[in-house]
């Protein structure tokens, strides 16, 4: 019988990623920019923001209890401009204080439940962390390559190498038997020539050639034929499959906070807890406990305890102690039980302990929550949950 962990490394795997200018990612960054602004003024801020935008309009709805004073609309506009978009935005906000029933379970002096007079979980839920030794950052190979392609698009735009690139974009990668067999890129771009003219067709072909030579070929040297890619006829490398991609961001589409859950997590071969990260302060275990599970999973794999690990934790609202913790690896049963017991002994899963250990509200941290929303919550060495420990 095949080991459960091996199922996360199927013969055929695929993953996608999106650039920071994708509409959903814009919403994630806006929500987290609000979190950052509130926490920078008041570390005890309680924030839960949902941002939805599209076609020139933005709606910000959520809860916030804070001493911080700032203009949410200006934070949203500034974030959108910093991404690289320049469309005008009409912004509607409806933000209220955190519900008292939730607050009493999170605040130390009000936590409910006998024996739990400490900071409880802000909600019920199950969080998941994963690591595998396929890549230097201990992430799935398909996810890592898809992210790399999007980062390359971003960097070539920002440094001016490809000045016609715009912020929106996507990538998708397929791997079969350890070999990359397909790459898809969707790159938001500007055009000089009128639609449906010979000049435009030549320009679109040149755009595909540039993206192929500068992005795909350095990552997958033996995949694709440049002439077929330019014509949109290569079955293995598809770049801007519809040809034009001149409308992007909220000018073309709608976005919502938390809609790119697989991008934010580990790709489609690994289950996730279900709750999104962005827009939430670290008292929300959807965010902080998921980071902690990744921290432990990465420590297990980086420490050589197992090739692959998935750590899960569940909470009840207002209660600090988890309802359950699970550590899964491909180790034999007796070794797996010992490892799980060691994890339970060495790592404190109470929400306040997680926040303190990872420095999630440390005013001196060299990263922002907006950074996590930009190009992924995992794989960036700046984030404290990405620094494994021995145990």
Image (spheres, grey):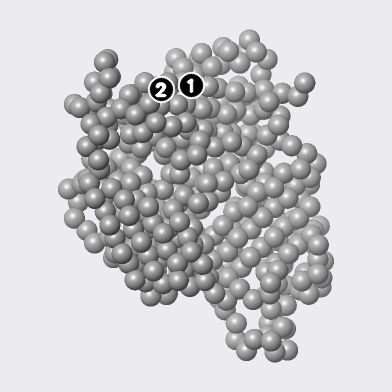
Which residue is the site of mark 1?
325
Q: Residues within 10 Å of mark 1 (few under 14, many from 20)?
A: some
Asked if the residue under mark 2 is in contact with the one under mark 1, i.e. CB atoms within 8 Å, the reply is yes
Residue 301 percent location from the top left of the image: 59, 28
Q: Is residue 204 left or right of residue 354?
A: right
The N terminus lies in quadrant: top right
SS under mark 1: strand
Q: Marks 1 and 2, Cα distance to the nearest angstrom?
A: 7 Å
- At 66% from the left edge and 55% from the top edge, which residue is drawn? 172
Numbered circles on residues, count: 2
Residue 7 percent location from the top left of the image: 71, 31
Q: Residues within 10 Å of mark 2 (few under 14, many from 20)?
A: many
- At 37% from the left edge and 49% from the top edge, which residue is drawn? 279
- At 51% from the left edge and 67% from the top edge, which residue is drawn? 253
Can residue 56 be seen in the rendering of this structure? yes
Can residue 382 be seen in the rendering of this structure? no
Residue 138 percent location from the top left of the image: 60, 37
Residue 72 got which mark? none
- At 48% from the left edge and 73% from the top edge, which residue is drawn? 251
- Classify 313 as above or below 80: above
Which residue is the site of mark 2?
322
| Between 65 and 238, the one nearer to me in the picture | 65
């Amino acid at each position: 019988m095949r080991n459960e962990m091996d199922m996360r490394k199927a013969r055929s795997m695929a993953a996608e990623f999106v650039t920071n200018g994708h509409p959903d990612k814009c919403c994630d960054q806006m929500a987290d920019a609000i979190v950052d602004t509130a926490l920078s003024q008041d570390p005890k801020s309680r924030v839960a923001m949902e941002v939805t935008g599209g076609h020139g309009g933005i709606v910000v709805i959520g809860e916030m209890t804070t001493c911080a004073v700032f203009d949410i609309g200006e934070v949203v506009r500034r974030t959108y401009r910093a991404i690289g978009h320049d469309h005008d935005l009409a912004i509607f906000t409806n933000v209220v204080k955190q519900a008292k029933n939730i607050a009493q379970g999170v605040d130390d002096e009000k936590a409910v439940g006998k024996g739990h007079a400490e900071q409880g979980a802000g909600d019920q839920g199950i969080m998941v962390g994963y690591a595998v030794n396929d890549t230097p950052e201990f992430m799935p190979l398909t996810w890592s390559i898809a992210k790399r392609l999007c980062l390359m698009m971003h960097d070539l735009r920002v440094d001016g190498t490809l000045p016609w690139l715009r912020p929106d974009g996507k990538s998708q990668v397929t791997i079969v038997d350890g070999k990359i067999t397909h790459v898809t890129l969707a790159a938001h771009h500007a055009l000089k020539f009128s639609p449906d003219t010979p000049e435009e067709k030549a320009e679109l072909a040149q755009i595909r050639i540039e993206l192929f030579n500068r992005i795909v070929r350095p990552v997958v040297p033996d995949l694709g034929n440049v002439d077929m890619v330019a014509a949109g006829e290569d079955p293995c490398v598809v770049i801007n499959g519809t040809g034009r991609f001149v409308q992007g961001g909220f000018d073309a589409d709608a976005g919502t906070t938390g809609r790119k859950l697989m991008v934010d997590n580990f790709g489609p071969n690994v289950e996730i807890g279900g709750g999104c990260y962005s827009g939430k302060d670290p008292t929300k275990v959807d965010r902080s406990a998921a980071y902690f599970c990744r921290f432990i999973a990465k420590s297990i794999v980086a420490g050589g305890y197992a090739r692959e690990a998935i750590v899960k934790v569940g909470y009840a609202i207002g209660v600090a102690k988890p309802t359950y913790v699970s550590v899964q690896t491909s180790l034999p049963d007796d070794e797996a039980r010992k490892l799980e017991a060691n994890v339970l002994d060495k790592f404190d899963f109470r929400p306040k302990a997680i926040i303190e250990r990872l420095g999630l509200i440390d005013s001196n941290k060299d990263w922002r929550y907006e950074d996590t929303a930009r190009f992924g919550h995992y794989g960036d060495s700046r984030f404290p949950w990405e620094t494994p420990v021995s145990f």
